[in-house]
Amino acid sequence: MKKYLPIILSLSLGIALSMIMFVMVNTRGLENRQMEFDSRAKVVADTLQNRFNEYVGVIQFVGDFFYNSSSVNRQEFSNFVKGAVYRYPAIQALAWAPLVDQKERSTLEAEVRHEGFPDFRILEMDSKGQRVPASIRNTYMVALYLYPFEENKEAMGFDIASESVRRQAIMEAVHTGMPTATHRLILVQEKEYQYSILILLPIFNEEIPLGKNPEGFDNLKGFVVEVLRIDDVVEGALSLFAGDGIDMALFDMSSPDEAQLLYIKTGLRLEEPKSKAVLNKNLYSPMFKRKLTLSGRLWEIRLTPSPDYIMAHKKYQSYLVLFGMVLLTFMMTFYMYKKLIYTSEIEHMIKVQIQSNQALESEISMRIKEELKLLSAKGKLENEIKDRVHAEKLRDKSISELTKALAEVRTLRGILPLCAYCKKIRDDKGYWEQVDVYIHKYSQADISHSICPQCMKEHFPDEFREMSDQK
């Protein structure tokens, strides 16, 4: 296992470096994508802010018309504003809502009926959302002139001060003398479900210089009202960005939480029962948000990339780097592995060769020992052969001597003619010889002369007695 440790360490280090490089490159790619998205989002936010400013400019333009005219009738109003409505299609309506005192209510209703609107009455909404004649109060803010009329005729005669949202905006506008936007609302004449706002510009009997507070309702003549459909404003302003795949939401931060959502685009249409459900969670923690101001209200645009945008702008450099480095790591690891296997095979071959050499040396040593043993055995055998040859020679000699002795013995064993008196023996040649000479000659035996005790006693009695005494 130890021999694989460098490979394992190299593989681990290579993978770790690959992941580090992947994270670095991916982080850099995300930063670049965020910068690109921020740049695009700023353009979107700036475009939307500029478009709302243009719509505010429209109502100020109409306000200037009222200040520059001693009186404005219905036809003059329509002729003046129709060009603006044409150029700015998100305007649902431009209206003139004069301040009407309770004492003037019946007179106004009669005059308008005389103009050709026989059913004209000052109206308000009841608790069920139905239009009903306005209750008696001191003043009314009546939607008297409307353009375009056909699309908005249901709002004619509506007392915009009768509803709390509109009334609050009226009070702020009178206090500041500046265009003031309402909270989101659903228009009386709305046919589709989308939020709208009213921008209210107070018109005083005398134009109020900038920086000077108005004198309140005593000097108020009425309101120019611009009705904006939020969806139309946003989608018209951002038509050039429609295919960018950017999810967007617009919030009115001046409103309570439950009434802040103005517009959303996440590939789904906004429907009231699902207004919370369809709101992409990412828009609550967007990648980009910008504060917008509109006629005294603080709005916030939130932008976040949609999955389509992310896929379209996804950078694959980090994955290519990861793939390349992992591939390089595995190639190097495979090379090291093959090198290790090759080295192991060489070492194994060397080990086998060494073992073979050792076995060969051992065999040679054994053979040398065997040869030495053989040589030693050979020497012993040669010595043994020599000894045996020498022994055989000795044996042959002995055999020869024995043969000769046997022959001599056979001679002695024959019948020997012995003289009865002198004890001489006659040989084969006829000569008589002493017994001892004959035995020595024919038996190779040496004769030594001695005397036996009997003869000693008989012939030398004295010496015999001495010898006996000594014993």
Image: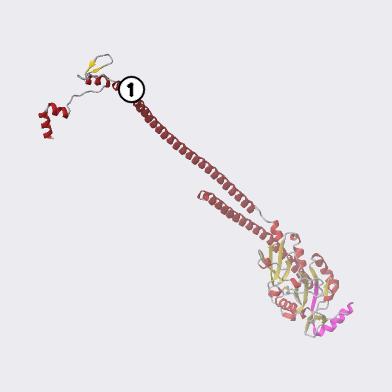
Q: Is residue 113 magenta?
A: yes
Side (left or right) of 419 relative to 127: left
For the point 47% across and 39% down, the residue is: 354
Q: Quadrant of residue 118?
A: bottom right
Q: Residue furthest front?
A: 420
At label 1, which amino acid type do we have? Thr
Residue 246: % across, % down: 71, 62
Residue 408: % across, % down: 30, 21
Side (left or right) of 381 relative to 133: left
Describe the element under mark 1 as helix, strand or loop: helix
Q: Is residue 251 magenta?
A: no
Q: Dot 1: within a 10 Å radius of its alpha carbon, few (fewer than 14), some, or many (20 or more) residues? A: some
Q: Which residues are magenta?
A: 94-118
For the point 13% across and 26% down, the residue is: 459
For the point 82% across and 80% down, the residue is: 130
Residue 195: % across, % down: 76, 71
